[in-house]
Structure formats: C-alpha cells, structure tokens
Amino acid sequence: MDIVFKAINDPTRREILRFLTHGPQNAGTIAQQFNMTKPSISHHLDLLKQAQLVDFSKKGQFLVYTLNKSGFESIHAWFQPFTLFFELPKPKIRL
Amino acid sequence: MDIVFKAINDPTRREILRFLTHGPQNAGTIAQQFNMTKPSISHHLDLLKQAQLVDFSKKGQFLVYTLNKSGFESIHAWFQPFTLFFELPKPKIRL
DNA sequence: TTTATATTTAAATATTTGTTTAATTATTTA
DNA sequence: TAAATAATTAAACAAATATTTAAATATAAA
C-alpha cells in the first residue's frame, strides 16, 4: 500500500502517468519527454511498476509501458472514506 | 500541488487523517494515538496543514485539528483523468 | 505571580530518495 | 558474427525526510 503513495509523490512519475493516458509507450519515447537521463526514467518506471500503476510487455527490443488499473484502485480505495466524510452528513430520511 | 502528495506519502500522516474522520481532535489527543514524540506529530500536523488537508483553531490552550476539504479536492482533481481513462472506452452511441 | 499544561520551534542526525555516469543484458540489423 | 539499438542495473553522491532531545511560547490553574 505504501509504495503507491511513494510512487505518486514524485512529479516526474506523475507526468509519466499522465503521458500514458495517451496510450501505451516505449520506455525510450517516455524518456524523450523529460530532460533527464534514461536510467533515471528507467528507475521511475520501475517504481511505478512496483506500485502497480503501470505494467509493461516486451515487443522485440522495446518495452511497452501501459497504465495498470490495479494501483489506481488502491488509491481510490484509500480516498473513498474521505469523499464519504465530506459528502456527509446527508439526510437520513428521504423527504 | 506537490505538497499534498508529499503529505499523504507518510503512513503516520495518513493515519492522522483517518483518525480525524472521527471528528475534530486536539493535538495531544492525536499524539496519544501514536508511539511517537509530540514534536514529531506536531511536525506531521504542520505538513498536513501546509497541504490544506487539515486545519486548526485555537480553543484556549488547545489546538483543535479538523479535516480540510481543500486538500482532498486537489487529490481528487489529479485523480479524475485516470478514472476517466479506466472507465473509457464507453460506447459513443447509446443503443 | 508562580507552577503546570499544551503545543510548537530549533538543532542534530540517521535514513531515504533522485540523479548521474559507467557497465551490462538483450535484441535487431548488416 | 560483429556492430548498433533499446533499455536496465550498479555504484556513487547530494539533497530531502522523519525522528529525537532540548528549548521556547502561550494559556490556565493554584
């Protein structure tokens, strides 16, 4: 559980996630978006993978990264009680 | 924006937030929940305040902390595009 | 007005984190 | 098979973080 919060704490990793909403991308293509070395991006992708926020599959010499629903579901599950807190109190009886 | 992600990265701070769903609490009462010194909790509360996840008001010699909707709205705003991503694709035409 | 209580602020420190350069692994192409 | 391409892993290091003990501030009670 902790790992997903650690993963989204970094601005670069959040940008990677946003970039992946455009669709699956190679590691190299992702790295091009950032003014940072490939090993650094590789490390960020590894962390996102650990958090199950992304997944990848091998296509020849390329690694294609995609968003992974699982990690986002963890975040959502954590967030849920607070949305309830702020929506409440609701009328107990429908008028 | 960054500060809110930093704030929820720490497990103690997340527990504090959860504790506050039970209602407003004094700093001391919050500190009692944790096997940790008061200055440490004070520091965590300060960070949560910066992130606008909590707010406090002074009641005599006590500081009463409450959840603050504002920070949670920031998280929600960031999360929204991903919920859309995973709900999509939906049929463009209602059958 | 002294003493006690509630809490924060400051200084110090060990741990964690993000980045870089260099080396390594795996795949494709010539 | 040799050279090129895609990407990761490893080692090193500066910067950020969580915690502690000690000192300071503010309010309440005696």
Image: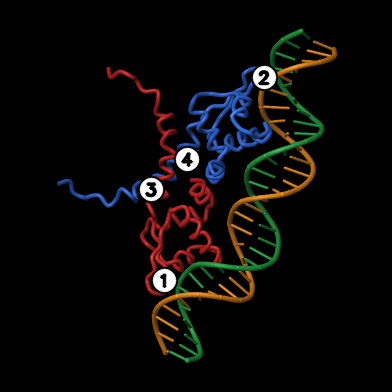
Chain colours: A blue, B red, C green, D orange
Task: Inspect the image, locate mark 4, and give the three-letter code of the amino acid beneath it.
Answer: Ser
Crowd rating for badge 1 (residues with CA inside 10 Å; few <14, some 14–19, many 20+): few
Image coordinates of residue A7 in percent, x first then y, are 56, 41
Q: Which comes sooner in the sequence, label 4 or label 3?
A: 4
- SS at mark 2 in the image: loop
Reply above or below: A44 against D20: above
Say which chain tag 4 marks: A
Quick one: label 2, few (<14), some, or many (20+) residues within 10 Å? few
* Mark 4 vs 3: CB contact within 8 A: no
Q: Which residue is mark 2?
A: A61
Same chain, marks 4 and 2? yes
- Kindly report the distance in space between the C-alpha atoms of the residues bearing marks 2 and 1: 62 Å
The chain that hosts pointer 2 is: A
Q: Chain of mark 1?
A: B
Residue D8 location, quadrant: top right
Q: Residue at x 57, y 38 (%)?
A: A12
Q: Mark 2 near mark 1, Cβ–Cβ under 8 Å?
A: no
- Residue at the image point whose x is 67% and y is 19% from the top: A61
Q: Amino acid at mark 3?
A: Pro
A60 horizontally vs B54: left or right = right
| Residue at (46% x, 41% y) in the render | A75
The residue singled out by tag 1 in the image is B62
Q: Which residue is mark 4?
A: A74
Label 1 – label 3 distance at C-alpha: 27 Å
- Both on one chain, marks 3 and 2? yes
